Image (cartoon, helix red, strand yellow):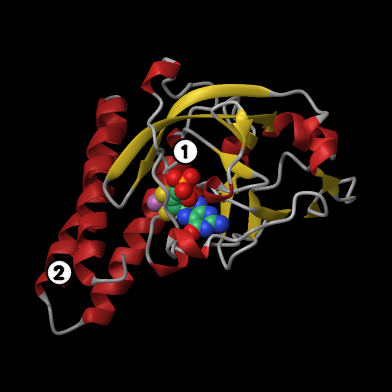
Amino acid sequence: MKSPFAKKVTAQADRHLINEVAKRLDAPARRQFMKYSMSLGSLAMLTGCDTSSDEALDKMLTGISRFNDRVQWAIFNPDRLAPTYPDSMIKVPFPFNAYYDVDQVREVDGSTWKLEVSGLVADKRSWTLAELAALPQMAQTTRHICVEGWSAIGRWGGVPFRTFLEKIGADKTARYIGFKCADDYFTSIDMPTALHPQTIMALTFADHTLPADFGYPMKIRMPTKLGYKNPKHVMSMFVTNTNPGGYWEDQGYNWFGGS
Ligand SMILES: Nc1nc2c(c(=O)[nH]1)N[C@H]1C(S)=C(S)[C@@H](COP(=O)(O)O)O[C@H]1N2
Ligand SMILES: [Mo]
């Protein structure tokens, strides 16, 4: 996603989003909104034509992506549910994806694993797998969408993330939650998505222990976000007001990453 072409595709998606948002506004708000986004759009065209300045193009596209983050945050509906599907539609075998090949998958020892918790929370003690498994559980069959051009329906089960956040006394007015994984992956999400009723700390896939490939011992599963926002093999999490970025996000993927 680092290439200028990939970034142009992102900019096109942003134009699409701008039009989608405009459709939802009433007439005066739409005029104002379009005035603002059109000025961004004409800037895009001007800078886009100036191929001698990659730096300017880069800066402008990053600006649009930040704008896109703010728009997605603003229109995110905490009560709207992502579609769920019958279990007969679960994709077998489910696709694997990571920034490395499947033979490089990290083998995490679930018997010694402890989820570390830090930042703006009342209770910073770490959690064993058995402790998480003893909390209330839910499961849902949803579609995972990867920006690399595939999507697949899967079934993830585990602890509703909201339940966990309330249990540890997380500051629900904080803006972000960051995650660090057993590989070099990291990502972060907005608090409204963390509290969404379909966001889960997944411990199972298709009603069995989460396989290593899919993020054992725990992944954060959000059907309202694109694949790269769903961290596998989570080792630690922290609540913060400073945007922690992410592995792909820091290389040009849109940070909010809604789907
Ligand atoms: N720890 C970790 N989590 C990760 C990734 C990764 O490389 N490492 N890749 C992300 C991407 S881009 C996708 S599409 C999904 C793939 O999840 P799956 O292997 O369960 O299909 O994991 C996401 N979470
Ligand atoms: Mo992905």
Taking the spot 12% from the left edge, 77% from the top edge, the residue there is 50
- Marks 2 and 1 sit apart, C-alpha to C-alpha, by 27 Å
Q: Farthest left residue?
A: 49
Pointers 2 and 1 in contact (C-beta within 8 Å)? no
What's the amino acid at mark 2?
Gly
Local SS, label 1: helix
Q: Residues within 10 Å of mark 1 (few under 14, many from 20)?
A: few
Please give left or right for residue 1 compared with residue 217 in the image: left
Give the residue number, with chain letter if any, for mark 2: 48
Q: Secondary structure at mark 2?
A: helix
Left or right of 35? Residue 127 is: right
Of mark 2 and mark 1, the one earlier in the sequence is 2
Picture quarter with the N terminus = bottom left
Q: Give percent across and percent down for residue 246.
A: 52, 62
- Relative to 116, say whether 50 is above or below: below
Q: What residue is disc 1 on?
A: 74
